[in-house]
Image (cartoon, rainbow, N blue to C red):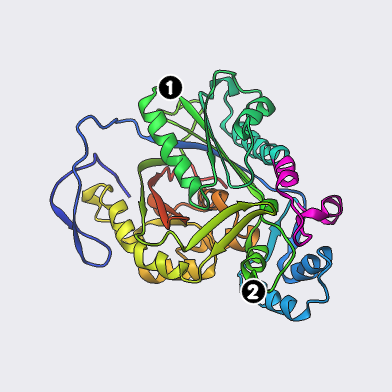
Amino acid sequence: MAVGPEVHSAKSSADSNGEHHQRQDAPKSQSKHHASILAIGKAVPPNRFDQSTFPDFYFGVTNCSHKVELKQRMQMICDKSAIKTRYLILNEETLKQHPEFYTPGEPSMEQRHEFLEEEVPKLAAQAATNALKEWGRPKSEITHLIVVTLSGVSIPGADVRLVKLLGLRHDVQRIMLYMLGCYAGITALRIAKDLVENNPNSRVLIACSELYASTFRAPDEKYMYDVVGASIFGDGAVGVIVGTKPDPLTERSLFEIRWAGVSMAPETAHVVQGKLKIDGLNFYLDKSLPMVVGENITPFCKKVMEHAPEHLHLSYNEMFWAVHPGGPAILNKVEEQLKLDSGKLSASRSVLENYGNVSSSSVLYVLDEIRRRPAKEEWGAAVAFGPGVTLEGVLLRRNIDQTDS
């Protein structure tokens, strides 16, 4: 698809469903140099679990094999999860060393944080190293570092530890994002976009690192979300490098970030909650979440489309979509509400199938999946959801001449 100069107008334009909405004029001072994603690298722990047999491991390692009915309920959840494999840093050996992680009533917050303050930056460093290797330029050129995790908190934080592990400059400008949830990978892209477009020649390294160990505990009939969480969450990290004006000889733009924004669904703070308690991070996820996402996804995506070049007249089905793979019900609801063709969310479904829900890393895993596929659509969006209920999204333009094989 040929793309000419952007046209900004206050006129209304039709969206993918034939409806009209006001376009927003771009500020006159808008930078002509858009932020670009220059490299993506992933990392997972060495322990790979088959979803079909995970209940055997989970109930066995927590000494709960006698809870036959509850195990059967978990098996049903796993079977319907659309997940085939996941990666976890916890294994039988680690849990033998830390029985407090799953012993009911046993305080474990201190032990979990000691474990996570080491493991979160280590996995982040692996992903960041892979991104830096792909980027191919000296790490001394990294000017900003954004670190994202839902897994544990510490002072100094994972950002400080990551600077040391990677050997980054001591004056690298750091941002540490704790406890945001599944949308935080897009939050990091939004912040990185602002940084590089307002700081010429800067390069931002994003590192998201998520470990389920913060919430792991023994199954209990009274707390079914612990069982649900154990059935869908996986561990993983991702590194992303963002900059403007890529050097044509040494850098390449995988995706231009044309717009980034966020919105909260009103009166939905109760739908996704998490609290730090003596036995770790306790999550609550209301069963209404897919419905809430469904009710708000179309208005949010209309907002995203207001920032696409008007002359293209893009419909949702003419775009690629990187949607947070929180679960099959959420993906189905997004597909239904946006009236997407079958296969439009195949990259999200692939990540869910192979990694489970990896919280903030997930949607960036989906972008990595998309950039490795043959390019069809030049324009697209990445959207994620989390506590608030918050919707974060970016409008992207793909460099279709630089598809990875």
Q: Is residue 95 magenta?
A: yes
Q: Residue furthest left?
A: 11
- Which residue is the site of mark 1? 201
**Residue at the spot 40% in from the left edge and 35% down from the top edge:** 193
Image position of 359 (left or right of 400): right
Where in the figure is residue 267, as x and y percent of width and height?
36, 62
Residue 138 visible in the displayed image? no
Q: Residues within 10 Å of mark 2 (few under 14, many from 20)?
A: some
305 sits left or right of 172 in the view: left
Residue 68: x and y in percent read: 78, 79
Instruction: Indicate the amino acid at tag 2.
Output: Ile
- Does 56 appear above or below 257? below
The part of the chain drawn in magenta is: 90-116
In this view of the protein, can residue 286 be seen by the observer?
yes
Is the magenta region chiefly helix, strand or loop? helix
- What residue sits right under mark 2 in the picture? 77
Who is closer to the viewer here, 305 or 106? 106
> Could you tell me residue 69's position as x and y percent?
74, 81
The quarter of the picture where residue 81 lies is: bottom right
